[in-house]
Image (tube, helix red, strand yellow):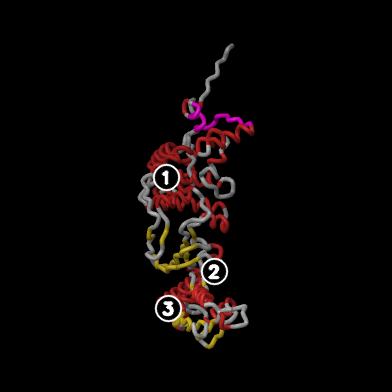
Amino acid sequence: MADIKSIDKILKKKKADFPESLIEKIAEASERHDLNAGELEELIDRIKKAYERATVEDGEAVGTVAAQSVGEPGTQMTMRTFHYAGVAELNVTLGLPRLIEIVDARKKISTPTMAIYFDEDYFETRFKKEDIQPEAEKERFKEEFVRKTANMIGKSSMNDILKNFNLNYADMNIVVELDEEKIIDKRLDRDDIIKRIEKAFKRVQIDNNMLSFEPSTSSKDETKIPIRELRLLADKVRDLQISGVKNIGKVVISKEGLEWVIHTEGSNLGSVLKMEGIDKVRTTTNDIHEIEKILGIEAARNAIIREAQNTMEEQGLTVDVRHIMLVADMMTADGSVKSIGRHGISGEKASVLARASFEETGKHLLRASIRGEIDHLTGIIENIIIGQPIPLGTGSVGVIMNRR
């Protein structure tokens, strides 16, 4: 059995430079199989050979290989725009349309969604504070807290809590009745609802759960209120938002294993992370620009990698993560998320011919000629265009004759 110190000694002797994660795995394997010193050396020798084979050679066209490795499986992807991702009520864009969304770095994605997790430490603190002992009571408390949070996040309108809705054309007013049971079921605060109604409508009379709305009119003669005004007011009353976070519509609560998770239609990461009891580490969104804005560029890079990998895996395709990592690195290299297109990476290449080969050929060549740009032919694309060997393999070596 070997510890990490003895493995480090062998690595120095063999002149092998392994990452920490690999050294830990070697230590685990050594302990599990009870390897002696000779067997451990043999294992490290074999791993060193495999590791060296896996590394990229100097001058390798990693960009071209990554483009091919991501692009070729992309041809096998389906064009399904929508797919029920584990939760029957919510639609999520997957397949090729989702991959295009990621590499195009679209500011507005077609189906933004969030997965909201809860902090177990927060629950433990609440259990101690409120002296909740039995497991059944703890589970009930969790469920109630999750449902209350879900109703705070998800959009609820007046239409969701009304018992009766009456358009009175004789008196030219709208009479509605609030449903007390629906308010309790949605874990909403009645006083908060009344405040929102009073703020939104100037001419409203409240008598317990009965509310009467009248259209506001500039005319002195109240009888001349047009029917259109009454119908517009009816729509406004029904659609008045009484709870929810901005940009989030429907929410679905599901239990994954032993924990509760909220899936949303729409996304607002900044507002959700401020709420109590939310796990700030695992709660995430599929909107990469929102992640960049709230959590920074490194988080956005990780989000690109995760989203691209998940999209590929969902289609049953396997792409080495290093290709996707290179794509993510290119997209986030200068501190902001850029697309891989003429408005992003491809349009900013140093080579004139490389830019012209992608899109808008005439425009790029005209601009370059006006500015007097020089193409030094250091890349692959530009050398292929002019028909000379690319600067890789035998093409990366130049021969100089000594005339002495």
Dot 3 surroundings within 10 Å: few (below 14), some, or many (20 or more)? few
Residue depicted at 62% across the width and 78% down the height: 218
Residue 196, image x, y percentages? 56, 77
Residue 278 visible here: yes
User: Real-space Cα distance between discs 1 and 2?
Assistant: 37 Å
Above or below: residue 266 compared with residue 97? below
| Mark 2 secondary-structure assignment | loop
Q: Amino acid at mark 1?
A: Asp
Could you tell me the amino acid type at mark 2?
Met
- Tell me the SS state at disc 3: helix
* Disc ID at residue 275: 2
In primary-sequence order, the first of circles 3 and 1 is 3
Residue 375 belongs to the span the image colors magenta: yes
Residue range of the region highlighted in magenta in the rendering: 372-386
- Mark closest to the chain's N terminus, 2 or 3: 3
Q: Nearer the viewer, residue 272 or 80?
A: 80
Residue 231 horizontal/vertical position (percent)? 50, 76
Q: Residue at x 41, y 76 (%)?
A: 135
Work out how far the residue at label 2 is from the one at label 3, CA to CA, in angstroms.
23 Å
Give the quadrant of the C terminus.
Answer: top right
Instruction: For the residues labelled 1 and 2, say whether their Cβ atoms are less than 8 Å apart.
Output: no
Q: Amino acid at mark 3?
A: Glu
Q: Extreme bottom residue here? A: 207
Residue on which disc 3 sits: 137
